Amino acid sequence: MDLALFDLDNTLLAGDSDYAWAQFLIGRGVLDRARYEARNDAFYKQYLAGELDIREFLDFQLAPLARRPRAELDAWHRDFMRERVVPMILPEARALIARHRGRGDVCAILTSTNAFITAPIARELGVEHLLATELETCDEGYTGRPAGTPCFREGKIERLEHWLGSRGETLGSYARSWFYSDSLNDLPLLERVTDPVAVDPDETLRRVAHERGWPVITLK
């Protein structure tokens, strides 16, 4: 039994669920397009360039969750899954997960996107374990603030080590550990596993993968 770790956005999905959620809310008239879309696009460009300030982004991205009751958010998310997410799920991604599960590997998704957005996606993909940016809650639902360490860059390593520790394990407990990702932001964790795999990578990750002899694959 080995360990298979997967990034989510632009890896298992043909798109970014965080970005798609904002676009979904804009399309529903929940957020003002002129004011919100420009900032959302700017943050996404920063992410692609490896320059995202995750705390600043989370202040922006989580704010709409604090203004709505949980039941309303859940109803929106069901529509979001049907309209936006399911069409983004790559058949080859499902097949890749199935191959690892068929081997008996422990499978987990590690994503900077928050758990409200991603937990239903992980269930749809049949991945039992999800390490995502957690949300602070209150009686009314969400406060609009993250809880604990965001699951981003080095934060993915911290969250992974904590999760493995809760199982009485470390990365070294597994003879092989895969991590599949598209993003330069995931270089810290890609460097820790035995089998880093670049999936439809951005230009920086593609260059690094070629320099280090890492596999480069496509799921598209």
Image (cartoon, rainbow, N blue to C red):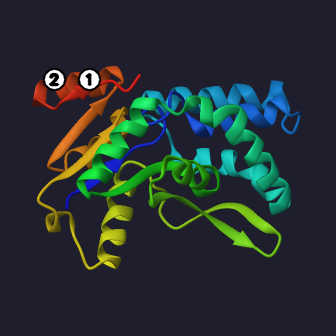
Q: Position of residue 95 (x, y in %)?
A: 37, 37
Residue kind at label 1, given as amino acid type: Arg
User: Quick check: marks 2 and 1 in contact, CB under 8 Å?
Assistant: yes
For the residue pair 81 and 35, the one nearer the viewer reads as: 81
Q: Is residue 203 above or below residue 136?
A: above
Q: Position of residue 144 (x, y in %)?
A: 71, 58
Query: Left or right: where does residue 100 sit relative to residue 121?
Result: left
Residue furthest right as drawn:
29
Which residue is painted at 79% across and 58% down in the image? 66
The local crowd at label 1, few if under 14, some if 14 to 19, many if 20 or more residues have their Cα within 10 Å, is many
Query: Left or right: where does residue 96 sit relative to residue 22?
Result: left
Which residue is painted at 31% across and 40% down in the image? 180
Which residue is labeled 2 in the image?
A: 210
Q: Secondary structure at mark 2?
A: helix
Q: Secondary structure at mark 1?
A: helix
The quarter of the rendered structure image containing the C terminus is top left
Query: Left or right: where does residue 116 sit relative to residue 36?
Result: left
Which residue is labeled 1 in the image?
A: 206
